[in-house]
Image (cartoon, rainbow, N blue to C red):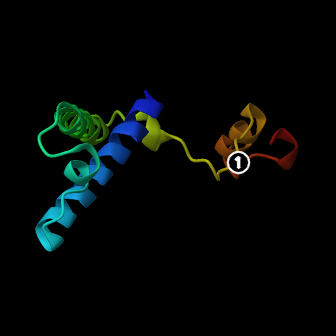
Amino acid sequence: MKALDIIALLLVIVGGINWGLVGVFDYNAVDAIFGAYSAVSNIIYAIVGLAALWTISTLFRTAAGRPAEAHAARPFERATTAAERQRETVPPSEPAGRR
């Protein structure tokens, strides 16, 4: 579901930017591109609305202690091996040979 979370977030961001344009400049980018109240515009608004609902579910999944897959990944952190994790759990009072 990681890809779906990212796509939904991007759609919500684009929708928010469009609403910002409407509020500040009285310019609706979706209507300008696809025509005011056209079927395509209505479909786009529906998709952005569904993306917002999905993003809300992502928020609750994260708040409930079940991190959403999109937030669980740490792309710049080096993966540790089982031996490295085992070394980290050995108490410092143990001899160095057992680490």
Residue that protrudes farthest toward the top in the picture: 1
Quadrant of the rendered image containing residue 24 = bottom left
From this viewpoint, which residue is outermost toward the front?
35
Residue 19, x across and y down, in percent:
17, 58
- Give the class, few, some or many, for how many residues have Cα within 10 Å of label 1's Cα (few <14, many ≥20): few
Residue 33 place in picture, x, y as percent = 29, 49
Q: Is residue 4 left or right of residue 21?
A: right
Q: What element carries label 1?
A: loop
**Point 42% across, 40% down: residue:** 6
Q: Which of 25 and 6 is in front in this view?
A: 25
The front one of 96 and 75 is 75
Of residues 83 and 22, the one drawn nearer to the viewer in this rendering = 22
Would you name the residue on which mark 1 appears?
78
State left or right for residue 17 relative to residue 71. left
Left or right: 45 in relation to 66: left
Q: Which amino acid does label 1 sit on?
A: Arg
- Residue 4 in the image, given as x and y percentages of width and height: 40, 31
Q: Which residue is drawn at 70% across and 52% down?
A: 92
Residue 45, given in percent of the width and then of the height, sits at 19, 39
Q: In the figure, residue 22 lies in which quadrant? A: bottom left
- Screen quadrant of the C terminus: top right
Image point (21%, 65%), residue name? 21
Q: In which quarter of the image is residue 59?
A: top left
Above or below, 20 relative to 77:
below
In the rendered image, which quarter contains the N terminus? top left
**Which residue is pictured at 28% across the width and 34% down the height?**
61
